[in-house]
Image (cartoon, rainbow, N blue to C red):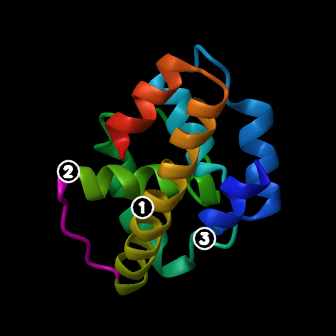
Amino acid sequence: MGRIASNYYINVGTMSYFMENLKPHTSEEMFMYHLAHADEFKQLDARKEEFEELKLLMIDIRYMTVDKTCFNESYTKVLVLFEVYLRQINLRTFSLIADLAYIVQNSARLLRAMFEIAMNKNYANLAKIALRWC
């Protein structure tokens, strides 16, 4: 697993989290939840100028299940912005636009690593989910 971490430049904390939590029958929703909990996204807490726009985005969220009371947590912000990217919603706050670009760039790398983890562990269902998101 060290080789996967070094190939995709993944933080040690993220790699150990993936190794502990990725199971053979992980649902797609839990898969995305695990992606959002990567250490690479820990610094993405919501800023004061983002609160109102994040609240509006969370009202209209369709695909990801998030706790609407804790919108200032980094993993919630990642899930919301990931859906914003998939639905091609325009953002007004510049810091959210920059965070969205950061999430998209890092998610591609993390998803490929999660796919390799699933392949190495022979988790066919998890590999299928990861490949769908890659």
Going by the image, does 6 lie left or right of 68?
right
Q: Amino acid at mark 1?
A: Leu
Mark 3 vs mark 1: give the one in front: 3
Q: Amino acid at mark 3?
A: Leu
Q: Is residue 116 visible?
A: yes
Residue at image position (48%, 29%) is 127
| Residue for badge 2 | 87
Going by the image, does 73 lie left or right of 112?
right
Q: Is residue 64 visible?
A: no
Classify residue 31 by image quadrant.
top right
Upstream in the sequence, badge 2 or badge 3?
3
Q: Amino acid at mark 2?
A: Arg
Q: Secondary structure at mark 2?
A: helix
Residue 48 horizontal/vertical position (percent) = 55, 78
Q: CA distance from mark 2 to mark 3?
A: 21 Å
Mark 1 vs mark 2: give the one in front: 2
